[in-house]
Amino acid sequence: MSAAAAKRARYLAVGILVALLGGNLGCESRRIPQEFVAPMEAAHGQSAWMAHAAVAFDLDLEIGLRRPVHARYTIETRGSRVRADLHDGPIIGYDGAEVWIAPASADVEQPRYNLFAWPWFFVSPFILQGENVRLEALEPLPLWGVQHQAARLSLTGADASANEWYVLYKHPERDLLVAEAYLMRWSEGEQYSEVTPRAVTFKDFVTVDGVTVSTSWEFWSWDKAQGPFGDFLGVGRVSNVQFVDPAEGFFDKPADARTLSTE
């Protein structure tokens, strides 16, 4: 894992958004006003989110040629730890210092990607501001033929990369995060030039304990001019959303586990 990827891992579920944005979006950007951030946070229930210790949810995801993901994720709302209990047995976790997998003999395809990449889309609306993050506006971008206010998030630290980015689309009336374009590389040996920008659209929102989340994700091809387009590439279903207080040691590396290499 590169230094930048390790830093993203440390901050996945923290109260800051470590979106690494760049690439040539072909537009002039400007500082995002609170008129973008505040309504989105209010629409999703940011204050209620921060009142809880952690959130847990089941995710069933099938996208492209990747092996389907069926797991229960538990993520700290105000910390950095995350755990994925895969439905077929293995557990992957990040304890705040290292990534581990249990049992040590478990053979899981792209374990770090599955631990960090997919929960990202669940937590995105709740980590829009942070001391190391610059939020900037883009010109309105089309989403299914309707112009939406759009934004990008950039990390200002030394590990920032112009090769990974996220673009957020805000619903013009409901203020919810309804789509997110992205280009990210988490798997070993994968070059940025081999990765194509994608988008995920969010729908079927539910409110749990004052927090509003999407339970249906659809993945698409993406470009700036069209937004999401073509046939959808995959689907994700979120269910059994609960706010929890994990037991002491819940995120710790078990005795029968191995540390995943940082290379």
Image (cartoon, rainbow, N blue to C red):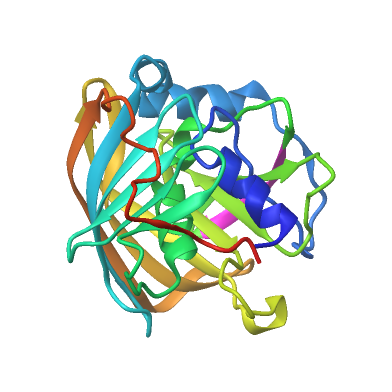
Is 211 placed above or below 133 here?
above
- Whole-percent x and y of residue 35? 60, 24
Total marks placed: 0
> Residue 190 versus residue 195: which sits nearer the camera?
190
- Whole-percent x and y of residue 248? 31, 25
- Whole-percent x and y of residue 141? 60, 55
Image position of 196 (left or right of 176): right
Q: Which residue is drawn at 32% across and 55% down?
A: 256
Q: Residue at x 57, y 66 (%)?
A: 186
- Look at the image and tell me in which quarter the C terminus lies: bottom right
> Residue 253 versus residue 243: which sits nearer the camera?
253
Q: Does the magenta stretch include residue 102?
A: no
- Whole-percent x and y of residue 10? 59, 41
Is 70 placed above or below 153 here?
below
Image position of 129 (left or right of 89): right
> Residue 26 versus residue 180: which sits nearer the camera?
180
Residue that lies at the very extreme toward the left in this rendered image:
240
Q: Does the magenta stretch include residue 139?
A: yes
Q: Give the range drawn in magenta.
A: 135-142
Quarter of image, res 32: top right
Is 71 placed above or below 175 here?
below
Is 125 placed above or below 224 here?
above
Q: Residue at x 78, y 50 (%)?
A: 160
